[in-house]
Amino acid sequence: MNNDAFDSDPQGEEYSATEFTSKTQLKQASEALKKLGLELVGLTKGEREKMPLDDELDSALEVASKINRKKEGFRRQIQLIGKLLRQRDVAPIRLAIDKLRNAHTHSVKAFHGLERTRDTLIKEGDDAVQALMAEHPQLDRQKLRQLIRTAKKEASEAKPPAASRELFKYLKSEIS
């Protein structure tokens, strides 16, 4: 008996394992798109405007947001949104949602990075200014040095860190 008979169709073409998608996998993909649709419905109108949505999908989301969630019409509208999402590339939408959800995390990281830069400038002085100027040539070297000197003086005299705050504000306005 020829074992190759099980690996090919009657016309002699070989089956590829990547071409076959089971009914379960299709249902799981459909459910994932419906969950994405629910997430899109949960966004505010302003947040939805930032998403890469076409007019048809946007109007379907708008209708779903107006329907009472406990009614059958809402379920059917989510089904429609899932169907519309199956016809589109959802990668940009998922990326935009991820960006929206993690905006706070990114801003906190940027804030802490600026604080570290400020502290390094105050601690290391001219060497740190040189390194920062190499990365960001738009900065005013004289203003940086003046703020650093004042911040060091305030720290040594145990005064409130007004110059340190001013240095942070300057870095935030110029680097961010």
Image (cartoon, rainbow, N blue to C red):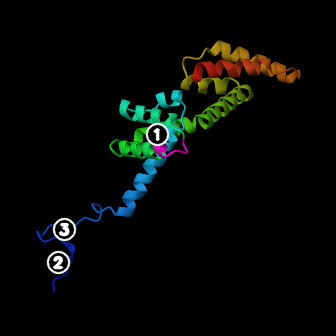
Amino acid type of the residue that numbered disc 3 sits on in the rendered structure: Glu
Question: Mark 2 highlights which residue?
Answer: 5
Residue at left offset 72%, top offset 14%:
146
Question: Splitting the image into 4 quarters, where does residue 160 fall?
Answer: top right
In the rendered image, residue 110, in percent from the top left (x then y), is placed at: 62, 32
Dot 1: element: helix
- Tell me which residue sits at (34%, 41%) in the image: 88
Dots 3 and 1: beta carbons under 8 Å? no
Per the image, label 3 sits on a secondary structure element best described as: loop
The label number, if any, that marks residue 14 in the structure image: 3
Give the quadrant of residue 15: bottom left
Q: Give the Cα distance between marks 3 and 1.
A: 37 Å
- Asked whether residue 72 is drawn in magenta, I would say yes
Compute the Cα span from label 2 to label 3.
Answer: 10 Å
Q: Is residue 153 above or below residue 26?
A: above
Q: Is residue 102 magenta?
A: no
Asked if disc 2 and disc 1 are in contact, CB closer than 8 Å, the reply is no
In the figure, is residue 4 to the left or right of 51? left
Taking the spot 60% from the left edge, 25% from the top edge, the residue there is 132
The kind of residue on which mark 1 rests is Leu
Under tag 2, what secondary structure? helix
Magenta-drawn segment: 69-74
Q: Which residue is mark 1?
A: 95
Q: Is tag 3's residue or tag 1's residue first in the polypeptide sequence?
A: 3
Q: Residue at x 48, y 43 (%)?
A: 74
Comparing 110 with 139, the one in front is: 110
Classify residue 16 as left or right of residue 89.
left
Q: Residues within 10 Å of mark 2 (few under 14, many from 20)?
A: few
The one nearer the camera, 83 or 20, is 83
Q: CA distance from mark 2 to mark 1?
A: 44 Å
- Counting from the top left corner in percent of width and height, residue 161 is at 81, 21
